[in-house]
């Protein structure tokens, strides 16, 4: 069974790379690491990168990457995915080196065609990540809106070994999932919708103060606040959503429930009301979760 260390990084396509680098450094609070051609690498931990921004035609999500729990698990995970029929491709040593990662594989989910990457041994930087004014401590979760909710739910829970933390509703579906071996309430969530798209990405804020500080920083910099501050019932976190320069929705989340490895609580079936999403009674603005194409990468081009 696949076991994970963490949600490691995502690759976003952005329409103005310089503007987005400035935003993710100075508004989100990440550290710029390096720029290679049309891609910029940023981090919010000791890892070489936790975000890659690529210059593109339209804003969206290109890849979601998880670090496996142990390096010696890599081959067994590769074989498992192959057996499950998802056709993993292992990156060449040169490509792994370019990414500052150890062995790395990619595959697409069979329903939306999004690329996932599983890797081991990402380079640890020589200097610690030093958070900026409002402190973020990690990339926390990725959320999709999808009309393939049931299929993706099954794929993640059976083939990829994600645990269910909570489920909301039936017709209006929400599912919050955590990769086996990781403690946080969710590093991946799904909502039923008409379209298939990115809903949002979330970063963990260290303290409640950091959420409050961020409210003022967003106002001072004319960044649209899309929802919050508020309190999510499922994970118990304090949240704040705002728009990046392309309109992609970014969340600050503080105080999320953590599950123990032994005897975790059962998943709950939560009431499908707005109160479940925000205990403080807030409502999202119309731009919330609206921008973010799921961009299909060509895995044939890998290693060429
Ligand atoms: C409203 C959204 C999708 C939502 C709901 C609940 C949580 C949580 O419990 O942490 C989230 O992170 C969300 O983004
Ligand atoms: Fe979230």
Image (cartoon, grey):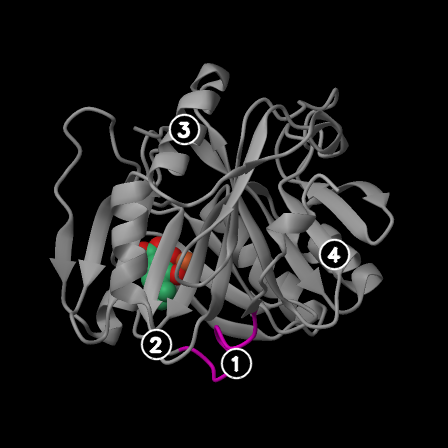
The residue to which callout 3 is attached is: 79
Q: Where does residue 142 sit, x and y in percent of width and height? A: 46, 54
Calculate the distance from the C-alpha at mark 1 to the C-alpha at mark 3. 42 Å
Q: Left or right? Give the position of 235 relative to 297.
A: left
Calculate the distance from the C-alpha at mark 3 to the C-alpha at mark 2. 33 Å
Calculate the distance from the C-alpha at mark 1 to the C-alpha at mark 2. 15 Å
Calculate the distance from the C-alpha at mark 4 to the C-alpha at mark 1. 23 Å
Q: Where does residue 128 sit, x and y in percent of width and height? A: 69, 25
Nearest the eye: 20 or 116: 116
User: Element at badge 1?
Assistant: loop
Magenta segment, principal secondary structure?
Answer: loop
Is residue 240 shown in magenta?
no
* Circles 1, 3 touching at the beta carbon (< 8 Å): no
Calculate the distance from the C-alpha at mark 4 to the C-alpha at mark 2. 27 Å
* Circles 4, 2 touching at the beta carbon (< 8 Å): no
Disc nearer the start of the sequence (4/3): 4
Disc nearer the start of the sequence (1/2): 2
User: Element at badge 3?
Assistant: helix
The residue to which callout 1 is attached is: 287
Please, is residue 74 above or below residue 165 in the view?
A: above
The residue to which callout 4 is attached is: 54
Q: Which residues are magenta?
A: 284-292
């Amino acid at each position: 069974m696949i076991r994970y260390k963490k949600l490691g990084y995502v690759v976003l396509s952005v329409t103005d790379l310089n503007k987005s680098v400035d935003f993710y450094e100075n508004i989100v609070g990440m550290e710029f690491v390096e720029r290679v051609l049309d891609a910029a690498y940023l981090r919010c931990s000791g890892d070489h990168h936790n975000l890659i921004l690529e210059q593109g035609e339209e804003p969206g999500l290109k890849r979601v990457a998880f670090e496996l729990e142990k390096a010696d698990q890599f081959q067994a995970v590769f074989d498992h995915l192959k057996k499950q029929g998802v056709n993993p491709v292992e990156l060449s040593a040169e490509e792994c080196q370019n990414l500052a990662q150890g062995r790395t594989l990619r595959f697409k989910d069979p329903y939306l065609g999004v690329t996932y990457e599983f890797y081991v041994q990402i380079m640890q930087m020589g200097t610690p990540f030093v958070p900026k004014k409002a402190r973020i401590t990690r990339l926390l979760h990725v959320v999709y809106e999808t009309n393939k909710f049931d299929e993706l739910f099954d794929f993640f829970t059976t083939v990829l070994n994600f645990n269910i933390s909570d489920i909301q509703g039936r017709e209006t579906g929400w599912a919050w999932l955590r990769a086996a071996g990781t403690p946080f309430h969710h590093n991946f969530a799904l909502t039923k919708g008409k379209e298939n798209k990115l809903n949002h990405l979330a970063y963990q804020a260290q303290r409640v103060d950091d959420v409050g500080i961020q409210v003022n920083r967003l106002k001072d910099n004319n960044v649209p606040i899309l929802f919050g501050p508020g309190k999510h019932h499922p994970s118990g976190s304090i949240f704040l959503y705002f728009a990046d320069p392309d309109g992609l929705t970014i969340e600050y989340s503080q105080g999320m429930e953590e599950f123990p490895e032994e005897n975790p609580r059962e998943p709950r079936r939560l009431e499908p009301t707005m109160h479940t999403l925000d205990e403080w009674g807030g409502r999202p603005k119309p731009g919330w979760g609206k921008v973010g194409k799921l961009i299909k990468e060509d895995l044939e081009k890998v290693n060429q």
